């Protein structure tokens, strides 16, 4: 005798979507925190004026000279506060922290499910 089943996965899809968004924000916040020691530091303006967007898709450095510091066009900082500081700090932080970041994102998504 055949058995007919209807499975409604609409709730699951929505839960996965929410967990993924929360995972993205958690991931971005962890990336931002781990990136700060690589950001050039003189008085702290560049580090202190950075944030993660609400959706977790961007890490924003607001200082007027952030672009020049990022590309290494104009350096005026000390390594006293941030010994790892230098240009293109995201790539350098990524090289040192990528496995940690992936684990953070994975755990955040799992917790959201």
Image (cartoon, grey):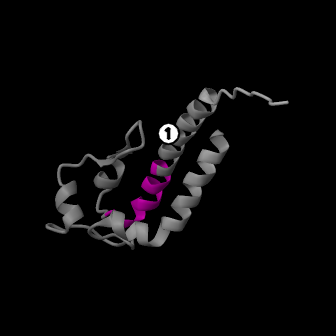
Foreground pick, 78 / 65: 65
Numbered circles on residues, count? 1
Magenta stretch holds residue 93:
no
Left or right side of 25 for 64: left
Q: Residue at the spot x=31%, y=62% of the render?
A: 41
Crowd band around label 1 with a 10 angstrom C-alpha radius: few (<14), some (14–19), many (20+): some
Residue behind mark 1: 21
Foreground pick, 31 / 40: 31
Residue 81 visible to the viewer: no
Residue 37 position within the rendered picture, expressed as x and y whole percent measured from the top left: 41, 64
Q: Residue at the spot x=66%, y=26% of the render?
A: 8
Residue located farthest toward the left when viewing the structure as drawn: 73
From the viewer's perspective, is residue 83 above or below residue 2? below
The region drawn magenta spans 28-39
Left or right side of 41 for 17: right
Residue 101 visible to the viewer: yes
Secondary-structure class at tag 1: helix
Quadrant location of residue 83? bottom left
Q: Residue at the spot x=16%, y=61% of the render?
A: 68
Q: Residue at the spot x=33%, y=65% of the render?
A: 89
């Amino acid at each position: 005798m055949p058995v007919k089943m209807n499975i409604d996965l609409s709730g699951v899809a929505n839960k996965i979507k929410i967990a993924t968004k929360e995972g993205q924000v958690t991931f971005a916040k962890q990336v931002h925190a781990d990136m700060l020691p690589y950001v050039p530091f003189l008085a702290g303006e560049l580090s202190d004026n950075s944030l993660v967007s609400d959706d977790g898709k961007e890490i924003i450095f607001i200082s007027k000279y952030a672009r020049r510091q990022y590309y290494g066009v104009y350096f005026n900082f000390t390594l006293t506060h941030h010994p790892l500081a230098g240009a293109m700090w995201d790539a350098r932080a990524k090289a040192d922290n990528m496995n940690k970041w992936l684990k953070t994102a994975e755990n955040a998504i799992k917790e959201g499910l």
